[in-house]
Structures are given as C-alpha cells and as structure tokens.
Image: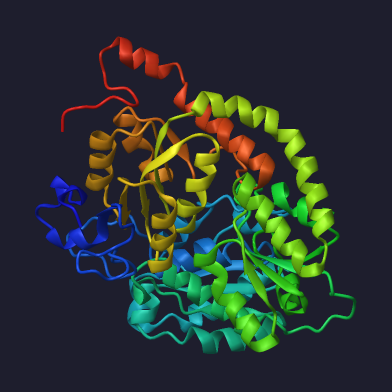
Amino acid sequence: MTTEAFFKCDETIPERAIHIAVKGPGGCQRSDGSDCFIASNIATTPGDMTERGCTYAGCRGVVGGPVKDVIQLTHGPIGCAFFSWGYRPHLADSDFHMKYTFVTDMDETNIVFGGEKRLLKCIIEAAQEFPDAKGVFIYNTCSTALIGDDGKDVAKEAAKIIGKPVVFFDCEGFRGVSQSAGHHVGNETIFKELVGSVEPEGDFSRAINIVGDYNIKNDMRTFEPLFEALGLRILTRFTGNVSVDEIKIMHKASLNVVHCARSATYIADMMKSKYGTPYIDVTLFGIKAMSKALRDTAAFFGLEQRAEEVIEQELAKIMPKIEYYRQRLQGKKIFIYQGAPRAWHWIELLRELGMETIAAATTFGHKDDYEKIFNRIQEGAVIVDNPNVPEIEEILKVRRPDLFISGNKEKYVAYKLGVPFVNGHTYDTGPYAGFSGMLNFARDIDKALHSPVWELLKAQGRPVPGTSVAH
C-alpha cells in the first residue's frame, strides 16, 4: 500500500490505515501480497466517528420497512422509531407503511420492570385501530434486548389473539458491526416466518421474483415493465412495494433476479437450498448492465429474441438524450460514497456517461464489494471502507472531484466545500434504475454540475469544482 492512501486526519487513529487504499498497477493487492487489502465488515475503531447505522436500521429501515401492509412496530424507546420513520422513500401503491409509525415507547419504568406486557398490549391495540393491516412486524432494540424481553414468545401469543402473522426480528442495534447484519436478520426471519406458508395454485413457469430492490422513488417502474414485456410474471418484490401475501408465495417463482447482492442474496440462497429456486445476480443501473440483466433473465426462459426487441425499443427512446448529456459530462471526476453495492454499480454507469470515478467508499461493504470496486475503478483512485467525515472532507479538498454522490448526511459537507452533490441514497428526484432512470440520473448530474451558483462562487474567488485548494 502506498503512503498516498493515508489521510492526514487519521494521524491520531492509525488503525484506519487498513481501511484505505489506492489502486495501483497490481490492482487489489495487500502490501503483504494477499488478495485484498481493504479491511471491511469489522467493528468500528473506538474514537472514529463512523457514518454507519446499526443492525436495527438495516432490518427496520431497509428490509422490513418497505412491506406496505403491516404494522411496523418498534419495541424500544421513541427515538429508535422516530429515526427510522420515513427516512427511506420506499414508495408503494399504499402509503400505510410510511404514513404511520408504531412504537412501544419504553421508558425507565418499563426498563426496570420489563416490557413484555406493554409489547403485547401495543400489538393488540394497533391491530384493533388498523384492522386492514395484514400483520405486525416487531423490531427489537438495544434496550429491550438488554433487559431480556422475550419478544418471540409475545409475538406467538399476539398472533393467536389477533389472528394474523406477528413476526419478531432479533435486530437489536448492537448485534452486528453495521446495518449489514440487520439485512441478514431481516432476510432470515422473513424466510422462516412467511415464505412458503401458502401454497397457491396456478402456472408459475414464467414467474420471477425481483429481490433486493426497495423501490426508492419508484425505481421499479423503470424496469418492471421491461421484464413483463419479455412475457414474465413478477410474483413478488423483495421488499419494495410488496404485501405480506406476496411474500408468502415467493417460493413458487421459477427464478430469483437479485439486484442488491449485499442486502438480499441471503434469502435467494435460502430459497435455493430449500426449494431449489435458482437465482442470477444482476445490476439494474446503466445501459450495459440493464441490457445484460434482461438478456440473462430471458436466456433462462428461452426468450432471447424478445429481449433484444425490448432492449432495441428502449434504447431508441433514450440514446439521443444520453448522447446530449454525455457531451456535457465528458471527463468529469466523481467521488461515490454509498452503502455498499451502488458504489460498484455506478462506476460503469458513470463511465458510460463519459465520467471517471476517482474515489469510492462504502458504509458497510464486504470483501466482495471491494473486489468489484477494484475491478471497475481506474488506476490511482482511492478506496475507503466506512469513512468518517474528516476523511470525506480530505478527499473533497485534496482530490477535488467535480461531483460527490452520497446520501443525506453528507450533502451539506459537500455544499460547504463548494462541491456539487447528487443524492444517490434516497434520491432527491429519481428514479435512477433502468434505462429511463439512467436518463434521470444524467439529468440530475448535469443540473448539479452546471448550476449557476458555481459561477457566482468563482466570481467571489471561492473554490469551485475541479480546482485545487490548499490543504
């Protein structure tokens, strides 16, 4: 590893060195010769102000939260519930899951004397107030786990009383090193409690599940019609715009199409093991990746010719506009910081638009995520696992990218430093998936880069995108 990979801001926490690297001529190589030198998916160093979320956030906010017709009940203090409420715009044809939040609101007395009775009362009360809900999802938190509440037993008792599924998630925040552990808990619990609980009749020979998409700003509307145009039936979405009844029958699909490898491969593996359901890994961002996803899915069903027809029709709609944006974006330098897969999903997409990624980071990426980043990113780029704000600032100041793509928390850091920003986490506009979504992405990047505000800053003598500043 070269000394260029170390940040000045990390002089007091040298433990961060193993999480930072610069891609050299040898690609993903440790200084000791092993295959990958990015340390990932390990506990955050004490004193490092991490950007990570907790296991509860990964389970409640990512995997379970998008299910549209269940009561989403947090068993814990009000703060945990409020933090997770409506943060991710996983849209659906019903807004019940985003309109309301439910919490047992544990206080000091409940912590001392236990919260099981309170939990049962809350489940029954919520089910009575919202009789149309198809079930209850209960998310455990740190405080209720530490006092030893038996939420699973309460869930079983409550299910008998209300006559609907009551699913308890062991997702207390301290369980894992990041929100990634919450993805695992969410997948495993939903699989064990719901998948296969109903055996419907019918022909499922051309049915697929879209796995690992959460319908952020209606991403699904950009690609679901394309799979349907192949002649396929989308049986279940996991978990964007999905109902409990659809989850129960997702084992009947002939193929799982897995979009987010980091949050949902778990359930695809479990379905393959128990039901023999094959799956393919796809990327639904960008022209090349979306085209490959359609071709690979079509090949499984022998629909190759139809895939080519669909791709040709879609490209005819967007390519003139894509060419327009490519000319305006050519040569721009990008810093991507996302949860995990989007960091490597988007390197090729940006390259299709004429841009190069000079820095990439993830919050909770695993070894395979960083291997994919290294395989895609250009030589000389910096790669960071679980960055903190001072590291992000140093990248923005020293490497001076033309654009920063990240999430809500990082937006204002970029603006304060005079760097254009696009929200790649929850999207300010979107959707960004599929062919039409790529056009939206290009539009938003173009708007960010060519905003008149940068000319105003230049006139004031302040730093502007693409210029170096003293560090």
Asked whether 158 or 254 is in front, the reply is 254
User: In the current view of this chain or complex, which residue is farthest to the top?
Assistant: 459
Q: In this view, does 314 lie above or below 45?
A: above
> Is residue 461 something that shows in the picture?
yes
Q: In this view, does 293 lie to the left or right of 328?
A: right
Q: Is residue 123 above or below residue 37?
A: below
Q: On the rendered image, what quadrant is the C terminus found in?
A: top left
Image quadrant in which you'd find residue 315: top right
Image coordinates of residue 50 in percent, x first then y, are 28, 57
Image quadrant in which you'd find residue 189: bottom right
Q: Residue at x 49, y 44 (%)?
A: 424
Q: On the rendered image, what quadrant is the N terminus found in?
A: bottom left
Q: In this view, does 277 lie above or below 98?
A: below
Image coordinates of residue 282 in percent, x first then y, are 61, 61
Image quadrant in which you'd find residue 400: top left
Image coordinates of residue 378 in percent, x first then y, are 38, 46
Q: Which residue is drawn at 44% across and 52% down?
A: 376
User: In the current view of this chain or complex, which residue is farthest to the right?
Assistant: 202
Q: In this view, does 143 lie to the left or right of 18?
A: right
Image coordinates of residue 54 in percent, x first then y, are 38, 65
Asked whether 128 or 158 is in front, the reply is 158
